[in-house]
Image: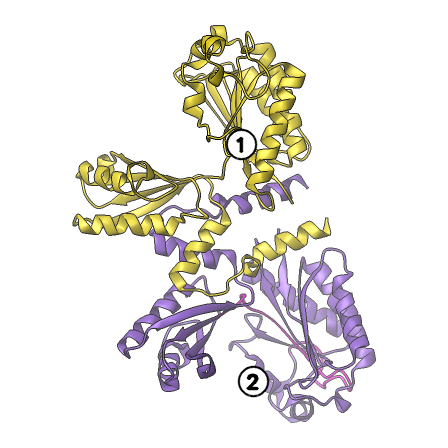
Chain colours: A yellow, B purple
Amino acid sequence: MKRFEIVPNFSEGRRKEIIDELCRCYSEMPGVILLDHESDEDHNRSVLTAVGEEQALSDATMAACRIAMREIDLNHHQGGHPRMGAMDVLPFLPLEDATTEDAVAAAHRLGQRLWDELKVPVYFYEEASVGPAKKLLPQIRKGNFEGLREAVKTQPERRPDVGGPDLHETFGASVIGARLPLVAFNVYLNTLDLDVAKQIAKTVRESSGGMRNVRAIAIDTRAQGNVQVSMNLVDVEKTPIHRAYEFVEREAHQLGVTVASSEIVGLVPLSAMLACAVRSLHLKGFQEEQVLEVRLMREDRQQR
Amino acid sequence: MKRFEIVPNFSEGRRKEIIDELCRCYSEMPGVILLDHESDEDHNRSVLTAVGEEQALSDATMAACRIAMREIDLNHHQGGHPRMGAMDVLPFLPLEDATTEDAVAAAHRLGQRLWDELKVPVYFYEEASVGPAKKLLPQIRKGNFEGLREAVKTQPERRPDVGGPDLHETFGASVIGARLPLVAFNVYLNTLDLDVAKQIAKTVRESSGGMRNVRAIAIDTRAQGNVQVSMNLVDVEKTPIHRAYEFVEREAHQLGVTVASSEIVGLVPLSAMLACAVRSLHLKGFQEEQVLEVRLMREDRQQR
């Protein structure tokens, strides 16, 4: 089964009836599961999480974008979060038998559809980037709706990948992409010295020379009696949770500090958890199908 | 969802057409998944593994027992494995939301049905034992069909729990019970000294004073360049895999030997694998619903 998780971000976080209407586009679409939705009034933004096969997810998203087109005018949108489109950003995350390539193809098809049917220009980011360099969201969205609207007139390199070159007058433009599911993994340290967490975060994160696929910052949790190294693991296949944990533990040890505990925030792929178990038991030859529930799930699906 | 795994053992491992007919009772029953079946000609025995809700599993088993009644005569059955019935033994293992109590109740109902509909007397074992002491399979089956047939005539304590007291003339009697899924877990040691594995097996197993819920023997795998401590973990909720692993590792260390690797043979509950991951990462507050696939499985079920 090739399903995807998508995380569409809409530039509306205040009007409950509009948010409900956007959510229903997903929750009432056959074959789509709306896993989560969060709205923030200060950001004036709603983040939905939905799972399904490509066609159903794209149909639901087109329906939601029609509502966004009708209800959201970026010329009058106020909010604390950067944004450039009424449907601002949407990544496809491959699940089950879907590959990153499948997610990229789904992103490209949805982008084309958004232009064809609604005349919303689209940028592709992360794995779905077109052209030689991988484009990241902050680069594309630099200047927000207001700045980008002007930039496309004079800077060809900032023009959309599909449609345009001008942004849609009220909707703006959307950023669609593909990436792996990320794991939010925090490690708590038995110290009240926030500098220790800062130093370890700097050592572990990719951007300052640490481990690939790890983003890390220090978080002040001294009110709880400890400090936190907060990580986003953006590719747990290549850089598994246990390796990040062991890295932090080793660095903490060097600084004379012990690990108090850790936590995973939100969802985590089964394979990432099994990899930790396999590692800790030195298991050889273990297959995901040996997990009883996985076996049952697959048999159940075949019987349907 | 309250499903069970059952592992019916039939005293027929040679006539393929009969074995196929027994398997079809399960594989063709709506709501039943036949996960596995293994036949051994020397043992003249077939072991099936099926999953489903109680009613469907019991209906399938009654159909299979009718075939066993027609085709198997224990007076003429030859085989290397101990046996006392045409359908010799069948444990119910609770899965998903089912509890051990549910499994015991299902075992008792099936036993009554076997007597009511086919006049096969039934013994209950393990968690489903009736009376003050927990009865184990080898005690009940002592003497096999031939010996037990005589014993029930003179020893009241050896009589069936349901029906009888005489065994069925051709079918014998069945042993039905309830137990937790067990995990077959082997640890390989970097040594060719089999005595090291024997000593550790003796130290770790419950019966000689080690850990509760652990059965262990040494296995000679010197041809592969190591030796093995082979364990059955019969309650991984109470005595988790990682604790057995750490116990063996510590004992090996005392004897100057290192662990080479480990393996899990066959199926393992998801919760047991997650417990190992949680342990190795010092994870706090982790919920099974955080596993993406678990969340999807539950949502999928609700949508059906």
Tell which of B5 and B169 is nearer to you.
B5
- Residue B113's spot in the image, x, y percent? 73, 69
Residue at 67% of width from left, 32% of height from top? A55
The type of residue carrying mark 1 is Ala
Q: Chain of mark 2?
A: B
The type of residue carrying mark 2 is Gln
Give me the disc on residue B139: 2
Q: Nearer the observer, disc 2 or disc 1? A: 1
Tell which of B37 and B225 is nearer to you.
B225
A234 is within the stretch colored magenta: no
Residue at 49% of width from left, 15% of height from top? A156
Q: Can residue A12 be seen at all in this image of the molecule?
A: no
Tell which of A276 and A237 is nearer to you.
A237
Residue at 61% of width from left, 57% of height from top? A295
**Dominant secondary structure, magenta:** loop
Instruction: Find the magenta span and give its range.
Output: B161-184
Q: Which residue is mark 1?
A: A128
Q: Can residue B4 be seen at all in this image of the molecule?
A: yes
Q: Chain of mark 1?
A: A
B180 is within the stretch colored magenta: yes
- Residue A269's spot in the image, x, y percent? 49, 46
- Residue B13's spot in the image, x, y percent? 72, 80
